[in-house]
Amino acid sequence: MGLTIISFLWYFNPNSRNSGMDRTPSGMNLGSVFGEPITPEQLRAAEQEGRIFFRLNYGEWPTSEEKMKDVRHFAEQRLLLNAELEQYHIAVTPEAAARYIKQLFGVKPEDAVTAEKLMEEVMQLAREGNVSVDDFDRFARHQAGQEYLVALVGMSGQLITPQETEVFYRRENEPMETELVSFPATNFYSMAVPTEKDIEDFYTKRQADYRVPDRIQINYVELQISSYLARAEKQLGTNFNERVDQEYFQEGAAAFKDETGAQLSAEAAKTKIKQEILQKVARNEAIKDANSLLNALSQGHDDQHPYTPGDLAALAKTRKLTVKTSEPFDLKSGPKELAILPKNLRVLFSLRDDDPDDKERSMIYAPSPLPSEEAVYVAGLQKRIPSEIQPLSAVHEKVAADYRQSKALELARAAGTRFESALGAGLAQGKTFDTMCAAQFVRPQNLSLFSLTSTSIPEVPDKSEFEQVQETAGRMHAGQCSPFMPTAGGGFLLYVKAQLPVDQAVLQRDMPVFLARMRERFQIVAFQAWFGRQMQMHFVPPPGEPSAAGG
């Protein structure tokens, strides 16, 4: 994915330290880089950087074993990268690193933002992922160093000429005149009416598709943040407006924009600041009450007096709070009643009452409040519901619908394959595409002109299907017809009637930017090829583990 996010932490936080890699000898064989053994400390640091990389790329922290394999792969490459930075004596200056701080958090270059606010963002992300500020600092500096290394060893990519680039531009931007023959499954639904035996056979072969995943029910107290706004305003006191003014002037007027990107008036910006501060303080007040409730809930329990699902209701009654019980829900869907964050959903699914080592049964309750945008929750397990396969009687209607969908898709693809065969035979005899379509009683659709850089056309509104059409066209020349191409909803054949010339004026206008982009693209390709060779030559994985060669 080529994330190129650069370090800035040390520039904005002079106290952030660079402790470096501990090269303490170890008896463990973790592989080597340039002949030097990899220490557990080096590997741990590289894996932390890998976790940060994963979070910034995918919007979540790696949790599954499969995702941790990606982290390990990144870590191995990072260990070699670090060694290469030392070999080339590349050191990132604080000033250079600081230029990319806004890019890291999606802030536009012209927008004003304080160092404290950015540092707060970093700290929040660090706490969320159980990584340190030093881990972030190291990760960002190494990303910056990688950019320098790309510029250095990928220099050959800058040598592509304008004449060579023009060939690529024409290929990517030449308009194509095409015809599409579609075979949508919806056209075959009337031929896919199942008998009862069809439904029974379909269900028997696909019972796993009708399995209900593990589910849970929870008991919870919901503390609405809106009910704490008055308390928050009282706590902020008489100098609240002064605080709002101070933040407005500290951030700068340009930092406050509406949804369209237009700068807000001073009054509107201060109203927005006031609401944000009130919301934050109100949430903190709700969290305080939730912690108080959890503290009271913890009293009087030990191995002889374990927690029970009813404890929360009993305590809530004494505080005139309402306890609700959710409908059963699974990890993918989440509860309908709670606006729960994904990370808190995983907390709820970790609750249990059957851990043999938890005689106190403390794992019935979430150990801390679960905040969301609108509320703070105190939650505990009511019961777990194991996964089970639903009987046919419970899913009969769905099975019948699934059968029709599957059968219609099968019929659509069979029709498309028959047409492909007949078309191939006809074209081999010198017949035209349109003649064969008429003979087979299919009506081709003339598509709007598009190129390999187009993003959509009206005749193919589905984005993924258009991309498949576009990719198919890119492999063909004028006068050629594609084979039958299956899609999620059926399939199609594409005929390229003509490839039209690129507008010369548009080409001249776009060439400077396109040339710069092509040189950057070739530079990255050159770096990846070089880095792959370096991995093969200088990185030795642990015994029994394949090499992570590649860029």
Image (cartoon, rainbow, N blue to C red):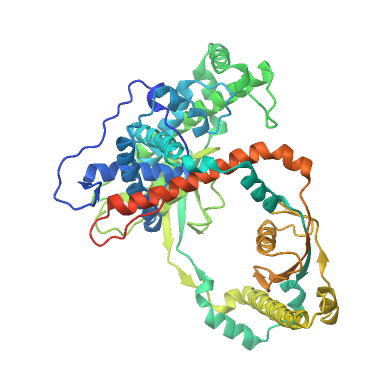
Q: Nearer the viewer, residue 344 or 117?
A: 117
Q: Is residue 338 left or right of residue 490?
A: left
Residue under the point 51% across and 40% down: 372
Q: How many marks?
A: 0
Q: Nearer the viewer, residue 446 or 318?
A: 446
* Residue 410 can be seen in this image: yes
Q: Is residue 511 left or right of residue 387?
A: right
Q: Position of residue 298 (x, y in %)?
A: 32, 42
Q: Position of residue 15 (x, y in %)?
A: 32, 21
Q: Nearer the viewer, residue 278 or 78?
A: 78
Task: Find residue 356 and report its image quarter.
Answer: bottom left
Q: Position of residue 215 (x, y in %)?
A: 46, 61
Q: Position of residue 373 (x, y in %)?
A: 54, 37
Task: Find residue 24 and report its image quarter.
Answer: top left
Q: Nearer the viewer, residue 419 or 528?
A: 528
Q: Is residue 248 above or below residue 370?
A: above
* Residue 293 can be seen in this image: no
Task: Find residue 460 and report its image quarter.
Answer: bottom right
